[in-house]
Image (cartoon, helix red, strand yellow):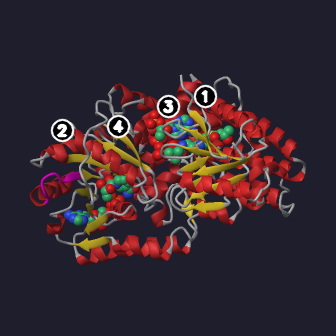
Amino acid sequence: MSSPVSYELEGNIGVITVDNPPVNALSQPVRQGLLDAVTAAQADGSEALVILCAGRTFIAGADITEFGKPLKSPWLPELLAAIEASEKRVIAAIHGTALGGGFETALSAHYRCAVATAKIGLPEIKLGLLPGAGGTQRTPRLAGVQAALELITSGTPIAAEEGQAIGLIDRIIEGDLREGAIAWARDLAASDAPVRRSSEQPVPEFDPGIFDAWRAELAKRARGQIAPEHIVTCVEVGATTSFAEGMAKERELFMECMDSPQSAGMRHIFFAERTAAKVEGLAKDTPQRTIAKVGIIGGGTMGGGIAMSFANAGFDVTLIEVDDEALKRGLGIIERNYAGSVKRGKLSESDAAGHRARIAGSTDYASLADVDLVVEAVFEDPELKKTIFKKLDDTCKTGAILATNTSYQDVDAIAAVTGRPQDVIGMHFFSPAHIMKLLEVVRGAKTADDVLSTVMGLAKKIGKVPVVSGVCYGFIGNRMLKPYGETAQLMLLEGASPEQIDNAMEAWGMAMGPLRVFDLAGLDVGYKARQALSDAEKGDPKSYRVPDLLVELGRMGQKSGAGFYSYDENRRAIPDPAVDKLIEIAAEDLGVERRTITDEEIVDRLISALVNEGRKILDEGIAQRSSDIDVVYVYGYGFPASRGGPMFYADNKG
Ligand code: 3HC
Ligand code: NAI
């Protein structure tokens, strides 16, 4: 088999090219090829070596598929030590994304150049890891301790120019990267520029208190995760002792992270997210419809956020509301959201203005005549939705995709009122829709393949993680939430308090405990839905008695200042003895004996409730695969990625 790394001499410059599609990951043959090329170059006529990549990107990292398997020589740290030790000057030439071990490879070179569109970063923390090939040691030597901690603990890549500003990139190349890098290498050789090894640079001066300050901050930001704390330790050891000691510590803690269940969970989610994009039975070459103009119906909580998601990605959006007043209110919320992002430094003023300008408002459905996609986000009322879809059928051009953001309703029944059910699909966003990454794509019985394919592609363009769901009440996520919520209600009656349940789940890793979630969403929503049902349809009264009583006392959750908790003016949840009393009375009334419930039991029963429903969803073919359910819960419901999602967690628990 030919090597994915080639080496050729261009005059006095040795050019090493990595060609390992799709992202030039550092698999064993790539590591071996790089080592062979650098070794060979030591004995030839080259005066400088350029390392660059073919295809869409510079090396995007270690090969994650090799993780968890026996390490094969040469190890990445050994390879990078060999590159750095080269007697010939080594220049890394970056395009695309130089990430993780890829950026560490660039750090082991003596000089770094990049095209302006390139990005560099150390995203290992997102896989529950730390940079394991010198990233925690070389970065602070070039950029200082503060900038290094920012880059490594955020995991967020930065633009080449920003990298240049902090000393990680030496030169931005205009025009052709290969030509520019070779020309620069010739200049460096001609001027007898030194072989400049990052490991030999001193760490710029720093405040000795910086490490404890970062530890305190990360303990809050990344509760319960081991990698962030270990990153600080690695940087500290390297900055306060020597490069060699720092490397030894980095290796030790990298292996600890690699062997941790946290990293196994996060690596599972990395691949699960990418697998979710693949739809069974949908050919890879299925055509996609062109989408440029998007209509959104309903400018409430969801419609506004959905409009922003499309506008932020460059789509022209028309937002439809019932009357001028509702339209003004909806557009007003969008404006305040953009202003808030500018204020928090998340968005520049000009970008915000550009995005906002793409959203037009209207109260006339005729303005949807030429849109390519409509997303309906009106009240959760099936009859209203059907009326609207009939109107869309009359109004929209042939080939337009008609999507509903319904949380629960039957997408097939909605499609059936139109003369074009093949164009109807569910696009279930999560609140706040311009922030939450999950998009459940609900495939109706008659949804056309090209419609599904278009929406899956579109999701990626607007920065969402799409997961396909079949049609059922609540689709994947909300359907699983039902038994989860009911189990929480049962445990309240059996003796747990709201704060015990929430604290147990949050300590375990959920972003928010179930009762705090109900208070946030509003208890009146479920109450109203139950009022429309017969007693038999409502199910066991134990599963809803407490929230019904709370609503009847005017306790709707955060919006009314009280629900399972009382809320102060800062919306802080305060345990309320009146709620404890109410639960006791309900338990007695329903004949439930109260007892002590442990935190372990709470976690076990709640997660089991999710997993059991997940199994049914799989058996019924509502979800394509178990890992899709994990993606739904991690990206839509605050399930900790470090536990890999409910199904992964259950599989590992046995
Ligand atoms: N190893 C193995 N496979 C990888 C990979 C990696 N590091 N990165 C991406 N891939 C695979 C994906 O699984 C996907 O495979 P598929 O087509 O079979 O599903 C394919 O490459 C394309 O990936 P994307 O769909 O994500 O492509 P994008 O163009 O959207 O994104 C990217 C490209 C920005 C490079 C993105 O893939 C990414 O962020 N990759 C991970 C980068 C990373 O985390 N690197 C650090 C690894 S850990 C490390 O280096 C440890 C070191 O310090 C020792
Ligand atoms: P909302 O009540 O905040 O907004 C609904 C908007 O639709 C209102 O502004 C209303 O004026 C408008 N509207 C009503 N009839 C209309 C019509 N005929 N034409 C145009 N506009 C009309 O509701 P929300 O929360 O945004 O929910 C909308 C949909 O999204 C529902 O189907 C809901 O189930 C779903 N959803 C809600 C989530 C949430 O967390 N709120 C999450 C995911 C989906």
Work out whether mark 3 precedes mark 4 in sequence or the reverse, and give the earlier one: 4
Which comes sooner in the sequence, label 3 or label 2? 2
Locate residue 640: give its quadrant: top right
For disc 3, the marked residue is 647
Q: Assess disc 1: are there few (<14), some (14-19) or many (≥20) residues with their C-alpha within 10 Å of its C-alpha.
A: some
Name the residue tied to disc 1: 29
Left or right: 422 in relation to 536: left
Earlier in the chain: of badge 1 and badge 3, it is 1
Which is more N-terminal, label 2 or label 4? 2
Q: Amino acid at mark 3?
A: Met
Q: Amino acid at mark 4?
A: Gly
Q: CA distance from mark 4 to mark 1?
A: 59 Å
Name the residue that disc number 2 marks. Answer: 446
Q: Position of residue 22 (x, y in %)?
A: 48, 38
**In-image side of 343 versus 187 (left or right):** left
Quarter containing the C terminus: top right
Magenta residues, dominant SS class: loop
Disc 1 and disc 2 in contact, CB within 8 angstroms: no
The mark closer to the camera, 3 or 2, is 2
Mark 2, Cα crowd under 10 Å, few <14 / some 14-19 / many 20+, is some
